[in-house]
């Protein structure tokens, strides 16, 4: 198979693109680290799948560009808040619109444009629906898994206050809202509007892993014990919350084992 993608060339172009932004800004730094973390996750998942070289490089290129809209979002609004824009749709627009689309900086050949556009534009959708092409759907699922996998690192390394907006001591307080707990019991990700309390946000960070697509991703989740480590990063103050988190921990690990068996 002749490979028409060159990840190294795309990475060099991405580094040149980053020169347009303040590399000393902490939010910019966080997003750069996340971008390369997602690339690493896509590489590891693809390696375990024994992807052919073309699909492997395509997965890594999509990972490299999946959050490109975030940098301009920060320039415009100094915020990652979804209230300011749909960063995924904006990123796809940034790459593909205009007479001289930016995507050509990263990939001269337009053959993969539809796959890249869809994967990036849809990577933060609550659910993937309506994609009928198998290869496009595969890469849309791949970037979602790689993104969530690196988010495990984020949830364990970054400050709770930076993620939730309250100190870690406050994040452990409060009860889980009924709609949030109902989603957990249904083994579903949590809808953003259903989150009310600080602990709801932490629960939603765990429940999002019900949306993982590939067995290979779950293998990494198990090896790193990510589910339990994220759940028990907080020391829950309310007895009811503590008991429910024990249930969620057991339920999600059982769910994972059923997938891997």
Image (cartoon, rainbow, N blue to C red):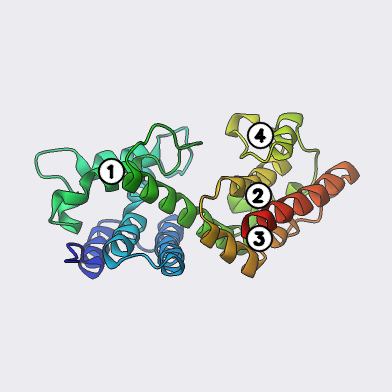
Which residue was labeled with disc 2? Answer: 206
Q: Position of residue 152 (x, y in %)?
A: 58, 59
Asked whether disc 2 touches disc 4, contact meaning CB atoms under 8 Å apart, the reply is no
Asked whether disc 2 touches disc 3, contact meaning CB atoms under 8 Å apart, the reply is no
How far is disc 1 from disc 4 in space, using C-alphas?
Answer: 30 Å
Q: Which mark is residue 261?
A: 3
Q: Secondary structure at mark 3?
A: loop
Tell whether 159 sits left or right of 57.
right
Q: Position of residue 38 (x, y in %)?
A: 43, 60
Q: Nearer the viewer, mark 4 or mark 3?
A: 3
**Foreground residue among 115 and 96:** 115
**Foreground residue among 66 and 3:** 3
Q: Position of residue 155 (x, y in %)?
A: 61, 57
Q: Secondary structure at mark 1?
A: helix
Of the numbered discs 4 and 3, the one sitting upstream in the chain is 4
Q: Residues within 10 Å of mark 2 (few under 14, many from 20)?
A: many
Of the numbered discs 2 and 4, the one sitting upstream in the chain is 4
Q: Residues within 10 Å of mark 4 (few under 14, many from 20)?
A: some
Tell whether 209 sits left or right of 19.
right
Q: Nearer the viewer, mark 2 or mark 3?
A: 3
Which residue was labeled with disc 4? Answer: 195
């Amino acid at each position: 198979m002749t490979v028409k993608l060159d990840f190294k060339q795309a990475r060099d172009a991405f580094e040149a693109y980053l020169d347009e932004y303040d590399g000393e800004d902490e939010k910019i730094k966080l997003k750069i680290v996340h971008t390369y973390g997602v690339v690493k996750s896509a590489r590891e998942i693809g390696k375990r799948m024994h992807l052919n070289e073309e699909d492997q490089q395509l997965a890594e290129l999509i990972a490299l560009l999946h959050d490109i809209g975030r940098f301009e979002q920060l320039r415009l609004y100094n915020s990652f808040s979804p209230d300011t824009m749909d960063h995924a749709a904006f990123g796809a627009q940034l790459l593909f619109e205009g007479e001289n689309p930016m995507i050509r900086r990263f990939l001269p050949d337009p053959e993969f444009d539809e796959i890249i556009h869809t994967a990036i534009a849809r990577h933060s959708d609550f659910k993937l629906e309506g994609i009928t092409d198998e290869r496009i759907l595969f890469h849309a699922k791949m970037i979602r898994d790689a993104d969530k996998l690196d988010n495990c690192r984020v949830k364990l390394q970054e400050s709770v206050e930076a993620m939730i907006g309250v100190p870690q001591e406050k994040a452990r307080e409060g009860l889980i809202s009924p709609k949030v707990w109902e989603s957990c019991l249904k083994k579903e990700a949590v809808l953003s509007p259903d989150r009310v309390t600080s602990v709801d946000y932490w629960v939603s960070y765990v429940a999002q892993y019900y949306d993982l697509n590939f067995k290979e991703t779950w293998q990494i989740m198990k090896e790193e014990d990510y589910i339990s480590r994220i759940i028990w990063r907080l020391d829950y103050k309310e007895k009811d919350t503590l008991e429910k988190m024990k249930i969620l921990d057991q339920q999600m690990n059982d769910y994972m084992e059923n997938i891997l068996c």
